[in-house]
Amino acid sequence: MSKTSAPAAPKTGHARILGRLKRERSLWAISAVALVWVAIFCYGPLYGLLYSFFDYRPGLNLWDCEFVGLKYFQEFFLLPDFTKILRNTLVISGLNLTIVFIAPVIFALLLNELHHSGFKRTVQTISYLPYFVSMVVVASIMNTLLSSNGTINELLMALGFIESPIAFLNEPDLFWGIMTVTNIWKGIGWSAIIYISAITGVDGELYQAGAVDGLGRFGMVWHITIPGILPTVVLLFILGVGNLLNTGYEYQLLLGTPMTRDVYEVIDTYVYRYGVQMGRYPFATAVGLIKSVIGFILVILSNLASRKVTGMSIM
Amino acid sequence: MKTKEKAHLAPYQKPTFSGRVFDVINIVFMLVFAFCMLYPFWNQLVISLNEGTDTNYGGLYFWPRQWTLANYAYIFEKGNLGKGALISVLRVVVGTSTTLFCSGLLAYVTTVRGFSGRRFMRIVYLITMYFGGGMIPTYLLMVNLGLLNTFTVYWLPGLFSAYYMMLIASYIYGLPESLMESARIDGAGEMRIYFQIILPLCVPVLAAIGIMAAVGHWNSWFDVMVYNPKGEWDTLQAYLRRILTEATMASQLLNDQQQQEAMRKLTTSSIRAATTMVVTIPIVCVYPFFQRYFISGMTIGAVKG
């Protein structure tokens, strides 16, 4: 648009810029609103990271507060909570990256073996349902199922596994297991979508060739389908490693109890407790910043790894 | 994708015995699987329609024993659930429409050819996808802006979205440039081009994003808990969370029970079940129809990334 409307007389650079701004004034007006918003709501919190280096209290000007350097960062690493949080994060991420990760792959492969397309579609649609409800609903449902007169306790008693009801949600030993089952239940159908579309993308001629070579049905799955979706699986796994620190916090905040805190506390729940609930803002900001920095390095590394292994990345 | 669909199945394979056995096991597995997906919701529905004190005897699985609507009546009369539902709906409508309008406008600005600020705007927003201040600086920002305990906090922080901007911009790139060019030559202003040309053409991508955003608004509870501690603007999810995790709701119920004969048969778990159903039923009713929008939203993002 700038080229079509060439000025009649040569102008100086200054005037050209002014002329251009005048022509684009409505676009710049829109941009200005978007810039003000992004400065406040996206770059504002980035500025707020400075709180972690000061004895900041709300309402005060940051520069009136005492500069304390890395005091709060050191405090976190020296606390006894630190090793506990690290362990919980690694265990929960480990479960998410193994059992929770592989379940949708198996589900997609099994779903692909169904012949009746109506049945297949129905099962797939049903499998999405838990994904679309909020974690509060999931927590409420789990609370009901696992209560002392809920279905799970009654089933276990009827089968003779236990004599009296178990208080599942107060049992530290069972927390990780129940959380894993819940995560699978909530995410399996949704996560399977990407694998189902990867299976559909496998070249049909490979199966013809496989049939000529005498591959049976299971041989086809093992030698053609699984290698066909392997790049997708590897890519998602590596990206999952990059998200190692994002164990989620909703489940813990809704279904954690004081009795299970030792096994559920992760960085996000810790930040919430110390920051929002106790008002220790600089300390909680410092803990959050530690997580962001390590998380960012992990994402970069996982993207490099993914580019090397699969040739694909998200950055 | 369509041409290769299932070409490998039937024609090349003779049904074998082991294949048949596998098919039967697989179908049984899928039936059990579907049951496990649905039963928890069904159980919750059954409890919500059963008398609270009767539910406590246990053994309630597939069908209510003592039918009642008292649980639902209580949450709407005493529990302010009607107000919560209104706020939830308001949040979905306002939050979704404002983010669609503003993110769409931003996407449009970054696609106008020859606009000198185009690249700059894109970069300023893309940076926000990788760097953020985290929970506490964001919380303190809301405190300092005076947004705590307001309705504004639900929609204003989500007004522009870099992710939506990317999705919409990649869609606008696919539209014929000549449309916008000829409108400009005819003297149409940018806002007019956005409203009359871009928005109508972008309906498919806006629908996909709108549904994603709407479900996100309906389901969100953490920001309600953090930014609305007084509970004036509690959404349905926030009510449900209160019943689930706070003891005050239970004591309020006990109080009501002591005053009124009709409420003797209510329990917190039956009331929670009824609330859960009120929150879930709208999602159950619409999700089979909008799942394809969700999936298309996911694939647009994948192609661009």
Image: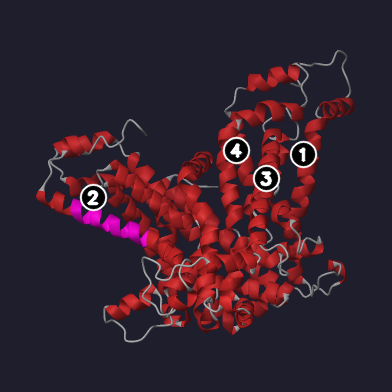
User: SS of the residue at dot 2?
Assistant: helix
Residue B125 occupies quadrant = top right
Same-chain check, marks 4 and 1: no
Task: Report the residue marked by disc 2.
Answer: A222
Task: Report the residue marked by disc 4.
Answer: B206
Which residue occupies 16% across, 36% down? B12
Subunit ID for the residue under disc 1: A
Q: Which residues are magenta?
A: B23-37
Residue B101 occupies quadrant = top right
Q: How many neighbours does mark 3 have within 10 angstroms: few (below 14), some (14-19), or many (20 or more)? A: many
Subunit ID for the residue under disc 2: A
Q: CA distance from mark 2 to mark 4?
A: 40 Å
Subunit ID for the residue under disc 4: B
Q: CA distance from mark 3 to mark 2?
A: 46 Å
Q: Is B33 one of the magenta-colored residues?
A: yes
Task: Report the residue marked by disc 3.
Answer: B99
Subunit ID for the residue under disc 3: B
Q: Label 2 sits on what residue type?
A: Trp
Determine the residue located farthest toward the front in the rendered image.
B261
* Residues marked 2 and 4 touching at CB (< 8 Å): no
Where residue A96 appears, as percent x and y from the top left, is 43, 64
Where residue B260 appears, as percent x and y from the top left, is 62, 78
Which marked residue is nearer to the observer: mark 2 or mark 4? 4
In this rendered view, identify the residue nearer to me: A125 or A271: A125
Q: CA distance from mark 4 to mark 3?
A: 10 Å
Where residue B297 appears, as percent x and y from the top left, is 52, 42
Q: How many neighbours does mark 1 have within 10 angstroms: few (below 14), some (14-19), or many (20 or more)? A: many
Same-chain check, marks 2 and 4: no
